[in-house]
Image: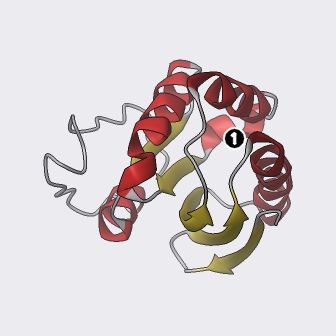
Amino acid sequence: MPIKYTMYDKGDFALVTARGDLNLKHAMEYLQACIQDIINKNVRRVLIDNREVVGQSLCFYDSLELASCIEKESSLRMIKLALVVPPSRMESARDLETIVRNRGFSFLGFESLEAATNWLTNNSYAASEKERLIIPEDYANYS
């Protein structure tokens, strides 16, 4: 089943909730559609909740493909993106995070919706060591 998503306006940010089967083809279609919605709705902060997307984690090379899709939209560099995934897919989320951040985007992966929301809205960031291996320092100001 392809990945279906819904985007909600939460005031300070847009919340994207997704469900479906995870594979590279579905992930690319989902990401491309989601990027167009983000651009069309002119949002500056986006929380992507992928906890209900089921399937195996994507491999590192799949993460490179997804990052290429993100990189094509230079306007996303001005947007703060938080990705929430289940613990079983955190390693894959970290791969994507590293690739995307190294390409100049403000993007972090989380296991907790609360920690992602706090980072996204610039509230005091208090994630446990288990959730974040390092404390993120976002040098760009997207407020």
Question: How many residues crowd mark 1 within 10 Å: few (<14), some (14–19), many (20+)?
Answer: many
Rendered residue at 67%/71% (across/down) = 19
Residue 75 position, x and y percent, is: 75, 38
Q: Choose top left, top right, bottom left or bottom right for residue 65.
A: top right
Rendered residue at 80%/35% (across/down) = 73
Depth order, front residue of 31/9:
31
Rendered residue at 27%/63% (across/down) = 123
User: How many labels, in total?
Assistant: 1
Residue 96 position, x and y percent, is: 54, 33
What colour scheme does the image use?
A: secondary structure
Circle 1 sits on which residue? Answer: 76
Residue 85 position, x and y percent, is: 46, 57
In the image, what residue type sits under mark 1? Leu
Q: Choose top left, top right, bottom left or bottom right for residue 25.
A: top right
| 74 on left or right of 48 | right
Secondary structure found at label 1:
helix
Residue 34 position, x and y percent, is: 78, 57
Residue 107, compared with residue 68, is above or below; it is below
Residue 61, compared with residue 86, is above or below; it is above
Rendered residue at 44%/34% (across/down) = 140
Residue 50, compared with residue 58, is above or below; it is below
Q: Quadrant of the N terminus?
A: bottom right
| 21 on left or right of 103 | right
| 139 on left or right of 83 | left
